Image (cartoon, rainbow, N blue to C red):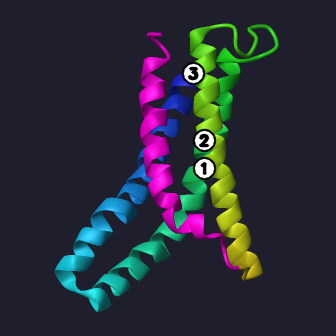
Amino acid sequence: MEYTIVLIVHLLCAIIFLGYVFADVIVFPIAKKSVGEKVYEEVKKSVAKRAIKIFPVSLLLLVATGGFMLSKYINSDLGVFNTPLQQLLMLKLFLAGLIVLGVLYSLYTKVTNKKPVDFMKHFHKFVLVSGFFIVVLAKYMFVA
């Protein structure tokens, strides 16, 4: 039962996290063309104001619950790369790790007022594509 609750929290946090990224990458640019630059900036600022309160908590819970679930399939007794499930899980962990590192880097640049590297302009696109593959791997690893 405990695992099921953690799984549900993990899925809800993933929906929140990827939902915001999807809106930022796909929905907002379309809206920008329809409503104009000024209204677009106001709407995006308003959404970002709410998202900044929800986004870090959902990411933290996503990572924590993911780590909890990971320990069921990868540990000192079961090994790390012994089964196809473990191999795909490690690939998921790698992609998720890149996302977390990108978020931490983004927070670091905001706190220190440093200019982020140019790639960070496209970070949400990377997160959306990586998130898609993480979701597909999450389903595929139990049938591989």
Q: CA distance from mark 2 to mark 3?
A: 12 Å
User: Residue drawn 41% across and 59% down?
Assistant: 20
Q: Nearer the viewer, residue 144 or 67?
A: 144
Q: Is residue 69 above or below residue 73?
A: below
Q: How crowded is the residue under tag 3: few (<14 C-alpha within 10 Å), some, or many (20+)? A: some
Say which label, 2 or 3, has the lower sequence index: 3
Determine whether the residue tagged by mark 2 lies in a helix, strand or loop.
helix
User: Can you identify the residue that label 2 sits on?
Assistant: 96
Tell me the quarter of the picture where residue 64 sits: top right
Tell me the quarter of the picture where residue 26 sits: bottom left
Q: Give how far across and how far down residue 100 sits, in percent.
A: 65, 50
Q: CA distance from mark 2 to mark 1?
A: 5 Å
Quadrant of the rendering where the N terminus is positioned:
top right
Q: How crowded is the residue under tag 1: few (<14 C-alpha within 10 Å), some, or many (20+)? A: many
User: Can you identify the residue that label 1 sits on?
Assistant: 99
Determine whether the residue tagged by mark 1 lies in a helix, strand or loop.
helix
Q: Is residue 65 visible?
A: no
Say which label, 1 or 3, has the lower sequence index: 3
User: Residue drawn 74% across and 8% down?
Assistant: 78
Start and end of the magenta stretch?
Answer: 115-144
User: Residue drawn 56% across and 31% down?
Assistant: 6
Relative placement, left or right, of 60 versus 21 is: right
Mark 3: amino acid: Leu
Q: Is residue 117 highlighted in magenta?
A: yes
Residue reaching furthest to the right = 76
User: Can you identify the residue that label 3 sits on?
Assistant: 88
Mark 1: amino acid: Ile
